[in-house]
Amino acid sequence: MSTPAARLPGRPAPPRGPVGMPPAGYAATGPGGPAPQPRRWTPVHSRRVRTVLIVTMCFFTCTFAVVYADGRRNVAHGLPPASAEISGPIILCWLLGIGIAVLTVWRTRWPELLVVIGSTAALVLPLEPTPALVALTQLILRRRGPLVWGAGALASAATVVSVWRDSRGHTSETSFWQVITGATTTPRAALPWWAVAVISALVVAATIGIALTIRSRREVASYAARDEVQAQQLNHLQEEHTRQAERERLAQEVHDALGHRLSLLSLHAGALEVAAGDDKVARSAALVREGAQQSMDDLRSLLSMLREPGAPDVASRVPDLGDVPQLIDESLAAGSPVVASVYVDRSEPLNPVVSHTAYRIVQELLTNARKHAPSTPIRLQLNGSARTGIEISTANRVPSGRPEIPGVTMAQGSGLVGISERVRKVGGRSKVWVDEEYAFRVGVWLPWHPGPRNRPQNGTQDGPQNGRVS
């Protein structure tokens, strides 16, 4: 009995196609398995084909040179050019030429050595300088300066000697260049010196011209690729400039809309604090004024993050776990009873993003409790260490008149949805439910991602932080 293959975590399932059709993006299968896909032509295939063609060309030129040299030797000894007997030195020259032809496989790795070997062999033996010219092409593509000039001079000398040696034949059976010029089996005069010079110059010029053409095309392709990279960088800078302008506009709008109202709220709260005849009203007005001022400070910090999110001075003003006691103090000052137990082991560094996320989650949990269950005691527990991660939980009684069912996961409002989103971004887990005692509970776990070892964040010291009981 077959079982479906398990899908890897984080890997999307294959897209489904219409009924009776295979999934989109998958090849049709037959009795022998998946249908074969056509092979794509790659630069590796082109390089292999070029290597085979070059080795084959060197093999044939070497063979022709040895055959014509043997024909000239036979004519010099009064024998027919196409004698059945081939001397041992000619066979050794042919084998050496085959070995040099095979060396052209490594023409891109050792072009200088191949030029020297191929040119030397063509100077002292009846062989063609084709391997040397092939290596000279690669040398021109990859090098510049005196080395290229010296290699070019050596290959040119080998070409002249090879052409002159071949031009000493008088028939089509003893000279390749005589065949090119239209010679037959009837003897004719050897090629003049100027013909040797012209043929040698044409061969060397063709080699250098091919090399220079390939090099210029590669340089043009390199310039085009560089221009494309610069264009991408320019587009990225333009997009970043557009985002920065949008952030500036949003920051200005937020500052104008909320800054004005918060400043008016602080002003009126201060006036109420001065004019109040009751101490309780005065304290409440003072709390409102301090809250408005703190909101203005938070607004400035958020606007700084919006304008310059990567600035180090902005990151230093972002609240983190070290500011949790201040949140508890604010809740107590606002008249919300909080029983808090906070323990954070800071012996291992904590990623600032996780620390800031934990602070915002605690802040939102306390805010939700004050909003939906005012004057109801809140139980806050926060434990954090590199071994166990960060565990945050709150509990408060469900207000009367709300018929929640114990043990059932609650529907989340906008505040709890925001908490879930923050938890998801750092790879944590969260749950909201009502327990058997009709207590509204929220549980959050965040992973302890390590961060850089630096100064304690916002003055937080290692070890437990004692909670307050009210």
Image (spheres, rainbow, N blue to C red):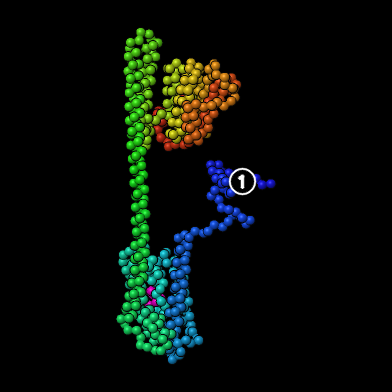
Q: Is residue 154 visible?
A: no
Position of residue 139 relative to residue 267, above or below, is below
Is residue 161 located in the magenta-colored stretch of the structure?
A: no
Residue at 38 percent across and 8 percent down: it is 278
In percent of width and height, residue 292 lies at 36, 21
From the viewer's side, name the closer residue of 167 and 322. Answer: 167
**Tag 1: amino acid:** Ala
Asked which quadrant contains residue 291, the reply is: top left
Residue 461, above or below 282: below
Q: Which residues are magenta?
A: 119-123
Expressed as whole percent of the image width and height from the top left, the position of residue 228 reads 36, 52
135, above or below 78, in the image: above
What residue sits right under mark 1 in the picture? 5
Residue 196 image offset from top left, x and y in percent: 33, 80
Q: At x 43% / y 34%, what residue is drawn? A: 352
Q: Is residue 167 left or right of residue 465?
A: left
